[in-house]
Amino acid sequence: MIDFEIPDNIANLRNALHWMMKEKVRPHCIQADIDAKYPQSFYDDFGPMAAAMSPGGGGKGKKKDSGGSMGMPEASALMAVVVGEELGWGDPTMALNMPGPGTGGPALAARGTEEQKEKYFGMLKGGGAKWAAYGLTEPGAGSDVAHIRTTCHKEGDEWVLNGTKCFISNGAKAEWTLVFATIDAKLGHAGQRVFIVEKGTPGLTIGKIENKMGFRASETAEMVFDNCRIPAENLLGGEDAHQKGGKEGFKTAMEFFDTSRPMVGILAIGIARAAYEELDQWVKDNYWLDRPIPRYAALRDRLNDMQRKLDAGRLLCWKAAWMADNKISNTKEASMAKMYGPGLAMEICSEAVRIMGAHGTLKGHLVEKLYRDIKVFDIFEGTHQIQQTIIAKHMFTDVAMKTA
Ligand SMILES: Cc1cc2nc3c(=O)[nH]c(=O)nc-3n(C[C@H](O)[C@H](O)[C@H](O)COP(=O)(O)OP(=O)(O)OC[C@H]3O[C@@H](n4cnc5c(N)ncnc54)[C@H](O)[C@@H]3O)c2cc1C
């Protein structure tokens, strides 16, 4: 059965978040872009909302969380994408600025031991805004996740980490970060381990904070590990998870992508919708589209084209999320959503600036900011080219399975 109705609890959350974005975020987003941050006091407003969405999925007494809920309790992947569109619409940096486990949440929810979930989700509750982070990328390993070079080796009841992570969202302020390392690079995926590293652990230093062209109000940091000692119990999932000789660390990274990619896709749809709405209003203020002037007809057709593609992009994200909630393998659909959303948003943002002419290039104009913000969405969580590779691989595997 196909059902496009959004359940009341999700619709209510979406409406509340839209209100917050419109009233509390939009008025500050241009200044935050210039300053490359929101002021700390700003996050006080997010306390109640962040608490409502705070993690615990899979925690004691709760049903196991596949990670599809992005770490939200009693939530679903569908909820995450419906809500995510509003974050992208309000200010896409809010997807990472929202206090809580953020990118660290899904993997901890899906792979952490009960003790780890209780301790580290608990650490983020109360006492003001707190964040977590996800540390996979390295200077020599972005798309090529198999080639991470940060090492880990065990000494007594501690693990020792050495290496550098880069472009880590919220890495500088995170209470804890999930850090990917390898016991032996030659083992490839099988050698990978994931550790929960707490802020302030000796041997961990924060390197440079990146100065980006867009998505500026989201902080992106370098993290350096120099003989950084981690208690043995901070190995994600515990030692037992690695006894089977499987690829737990690598699976953690991949599982995260199956849930985060539809989210990135829908954030991009939110950005595209924001640019579309700005353009739509601007066109209505400046033209009478019902007049039989060829240029006006072209503008009307262009807006119409954008709206149709926005609907298609949204449905791709909803489908990938629905599959995650129903425990249906969604790697191909997650990649399709991730590939389509940012591509479409780049097209719409670029068109919005073009149609608005010089006006659209002015600092202080939302479309000027969105035009710069959108580019990173085509890069993180797997670039456009990487999604193409994944989709192609699954297309041919699926065909092979059907014809076997
Ligand atoms: C704002 C921002 C926030 C981020 N946050 C995080 C975070 O919180 N945690 C984290 O771990 N990382 C984070 N990243 C890093 C991000 O995940 C990587 O930048 C991304 O995986 C791409 O890696 P790369 O930059 O090293 O590019 P590369 O992998 O070097 O790619 C460069 C180019 O080569 C192409 N390419 C690479 N391999 C192939 C291939 N096999 N076939 C065809 N083309 C290929 C790519 O498509 C791209 O065009 C963030 C990045 C940004 C910009």
Image (cartoon, rainbow, N blue to C red):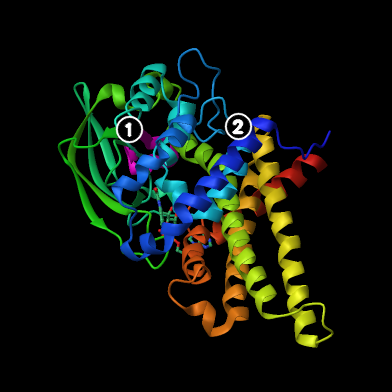
Q: Write the residue at 28% across / 44% down.
A: 173
Q: Nearer the viewer, mark 1 or mark 2?
A: 2
Q: Amino acid at mark 1?
A: Phe
Q: Is ligand 1 within 8 Å of the beta carbon of the residue shown at mark 2? A: no
Identify the disc placed on residue 73: none
Check if mark 1's residue and mark 2's residue have beta carbons within 8 Å.
Answer: no
In the rendered view of the protein, which quadrant contains the N terminus? top right
Residue 75 location in percent, x, y?
57, 29
Q: Write the residue at 42% across / 43% down.
A: 98
The magenta stretch spans residue 183: yes
Cα separation between marks 1 and 2: 26 Å
Residue 309 location in percent, x, y?
72, 61
Residue 174 location in percent, x, y?
30, 40
The magenta stretch spans residue 60: no
Visible residue check, residue 329: no
Q: Amino acid at mark 2?
A: Ser
Residue 156 sits in quarter: top left
Query: In the depicted view, which residue is nearer to us: 380 or 89?
Result: 89
Visible residue check, residue 50: yes
Query: In the depicted view, which residue is nearer to us: 33 or 172?
Result: 33
Identify the disc placed on residue 76: 2
The vertical placement of 333 against 359, above or below, is above
The kind of secondary structure element at disc 1 is strand
Residue at which label 1 appears = 195
The kind of secondary structure element at disc 2 is loop
- Write down the region rendered in magenta: 178-195
Mark before the other along the chain sequence, 1 or 2: 2
